[in-house]
Image (tube, rainbow, N blue to C red):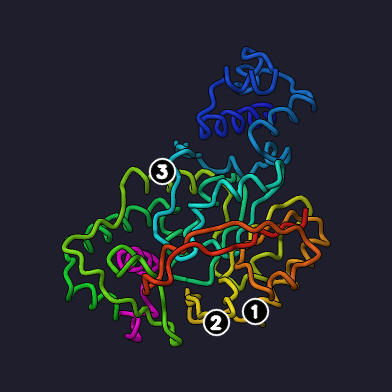
Amino acid sequence: MLALLVGTRIKDVRNSLMISQEDLSRITGIERTQISKIENGNANITLETIERLSIALKLRVADLFDESYYKKPQQIYVYNTEKLTPFVKWAGGKTQILGEIKSRMPINYNSYFEPFVGGGALFFHIAPQRGHINDSNLDLISAYRSIKDDAKFNQLITKLEEHERNHSEQYYYQIRDLDREEAFNDASQVDRAARMIYLNKACFNGLYRVNSKGFFNVPSGKKKTVKTFNREALINIHNYLASNKVEISSLDFEEALVEAEYGDFVYFDPPYDVFEEQSNFTSYSKESFGRDEQKRLLNVFEKLSQKGAYLMLSNHNTSFIRDSYKKYNMSVINAKRMINSDANNRGNVEELIITNY
């Protein structure tokens, strides 16, 4: 019975990753006929074979024996990791420097953590099978959660299509101002998610910004029509999230990292420190992220480093950040600021990539 359960688990994960038995054979060095027998529960599996398969399928060995996985029928989701891209435009997004970031990542790690996920450019680029993404923006996290859940995903599609049909200048401001109403506190997760995505696509320059009271305050982008989503791309994201063990939360960043341990990889992309000579946009949520928060972040960074986690952090190349992380490894890169209400403040800026390894 146990052999069949393990074999079924191996087959399900292999199919979800779109890996053929032949490909798995080449990766592991296990004959294809033996893999077939294992998946059908007709082979005694050695510990060496289990280890090879778990590494190839990016699973912990314990996952192969997790009986809770078999208590309900499993749906197989097919997704293409090469086509996973952010579903919203987000200030500070890392799409343009993914190569710089990925080249500095550890080759091997356990779980992936990203406590300031935003649009998730790096998260979707590496598509971890096990991880925890978090953001203080509850509406954004409502979108991630709605996309992951089967029933809510279908409801989200319907709601986004409704926003597209009803779009006009007047409609935009009507939807934008919903968060000023007390009833908005009781809005469903799907409604909050659809509103956030619609506003992101319809507002000026794709800028997500809230005021000190937490109200979205970006003016309309004055578009005649709005396309809120690409169906194929959003289905691909849904299938990916539904296939893997990715926790999604809207917590304080410190709380979101409680379970990060030795061998895990944590990527920090917080609201950036402000250049001394100018004021920069950091208002992703009503909670400010000033120097005190930057210092608290440093404290969390140091505690996780002592645990033995792999850590990477992006921030502006300011003297404050350089001094704060001076005992760690730093690289300076040039990045383009693409989202700013003032076109004169867009352009190249120096960023730091900081690692503890």
* Residue 15 in the image, given as x and y percentages of width and height: 52, 30
C-alpha gap between disc 1 and disc 3: 35 Å
Determine whether label 1 and label 2 are within 8 Å by CB.
yes
Q: Magenta segment range?
A: 178-199
> How many tags in the picture?
3
Under tag 3, what secondary structure? helix
Magenta stretch encompasses residue 197: yes
The reply, left or right, for residue 136 in relation to residue 86 is right
* Residue 59 in the image, given as x and y percentages of width and height: 67, 39
Mark 2 sits on what residue? 288
The reply, left or right, for residue 189 in relation to residue 28 is left
Disc 2 residue type? Answer: Ser
Disc 3 residue type? Answer: Asn
Mark 3 sits on what residue? 236
Q: Which numbered disc covers residue 293?
A: 1
**In the displayed image of the protein, which residue is found farthest to the right?**
306
The reply, left or right, for residue 257 in relation to residue 217 is right
Residue at image coords 39%, 55%: 87
